[in-house]
Amino acid sequence: MAPTGGPAWFDQLRADARAAQAQVPVPSAREEVWRYTPIDDLELDRYSLAEGGETALVPTGIDALVTISVVDGRVVGIAPTSPEVAGLTVCTATTGAPGLAVVQTPADDDHLLRFHHGYAHDAVVLEVARGASIDAPIVVHHIATDTSHGVSLPWLSISLGEGSSCQVVEVYDGGGPSVLTLPVTEVSIGAGAHLRHVALQRTATGTWHLARQLAQVERDGTFESFSVGLGASFDRVRTDVAVVGRGASSRLRSVYLGTEDQLHDVRTIQDHQAGHSTSDLLCKGAVADQARSVYTGTIRIRNGAIRSDAVQNNHNLVLGDGAQAESVPNLDILENDVRCAHGSTVGPVDEDQRYYLESRGIEPEVAERLLVAGFFEDVLDQLPIPGVRALVHAELAQRLATITIGGVHG
């Protein structure tokens, strides 16, 4: 099953990851990090690497500077073929990358992360040179083929040089019953650099989409991340951001909409390793039918990270008697001179607001859909790449139009 090919350093990286994976326990719902999830149903030995055969490329709907098409973790196209953009290098691990900017984090002992690194066919590598500014989006379009018990291992490495800036959008399509996707995005942001990143997940029903995002931000650098979870049956996104330089900052935003029997699982770690650093998180979700959601977030302030400022908020709408939402915020503070705040809410749509709309002749179900759309509006306005906002609005509106809202009364 283990793939081969490419430079010797990449083969060695994969071999080392497979050896490390054998020493790390298989994930279990008994662990806090997998609590509330069906992870015990995952049997990795039943899966084989998807072949990455012919598949129709779905338009992303995004006007991009460069579009990279990836099928089952294999790069099948780059348009334009040889992008000539000053300061931007686009390549893959097997065809010319000098080496992956693999981000080292405490989460590196994760079994699935080691599995991913051990069996990935390739990786997309984006490098932005010092001082370069890439002002239009780079789109990486990941497609998983509908292969029974096929596993897809997309890998994106982004490295920004000092004082540079870039916009990257990842779109996840395809999948199907018994399909597993394990995407990993690793980000290294140099001093004073600024990355805007959006991930839109809209894979087919039945897919298990278990994504990892790992970011490291140096002095005065900025990481803006926005994740949108719409598809898949089990949609999990774990984002670990380490602000390691003085004055570094992260801004995390995410939204999810659960229908039928979907599970959306969002995990975040805001890890402050340097003083005078900031992080700001806002996660909003809604669940209907028999859908469930879980948000678990940790603000970690390490010893010596004085004057750190961290905020974490998670808000959930429960739109039916069969839907459930869990919110678990955590603080891990090892320093005194800091500012930290967190909050969470779980509940139905506001009864007074619904009454106001209905009293003006709006049908109850239409009123509830308007309120759900309004619930998401403030966070959608904060999408860091303007060209993606219309697409995300349209995707959410399309799904809201088809769901049955149960009208939970508190």
Image: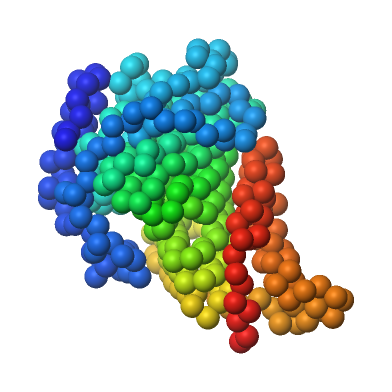
The answer to which image quadrant residue 182 occupies is: top left
At x 50%, y 38%, the residue is 170
At x 57%, y 35%, the residue is 60
Query: In this view of the protein, which residue sits in the foreground, 22 or 207?
Result: 207
Visible residue check, residue 280:
no
Q: How many marks?
A: 0
Left or right relative to 302: residue 84: right
Position of the C terminus by quadrant = bottom right
Left or right relative to 380: residue 310: left
Residue 210 versus residue 358 in the image, above or below: above
Residue 181 versus residue 160 in the image, above or below: below
Q: Position of residue 390 (x, y in %)?
A: 69, 44
Q: Position of residue 229 (x, y in %)?
A: 51, 54
Residue 212 versus residue 405 in the image, above or below: above
The answer to which image quadrant residue 126 occupies is: top left
Q: Position of residue 379 (x, y in %)?
A: 65, 57
Query: In this view of the protein, which residue sits in the foreground, 402 or 142?
Result: 402
At x 16%, y 35%, the residue is 1
Query: In this view of the protein, which residue sits in the foreground, 104 or 353?
Result: 353
At x 46%, y 47%, the residue is 203
Q: Position of residue 338 (x, y in %)?
A: 52, 63
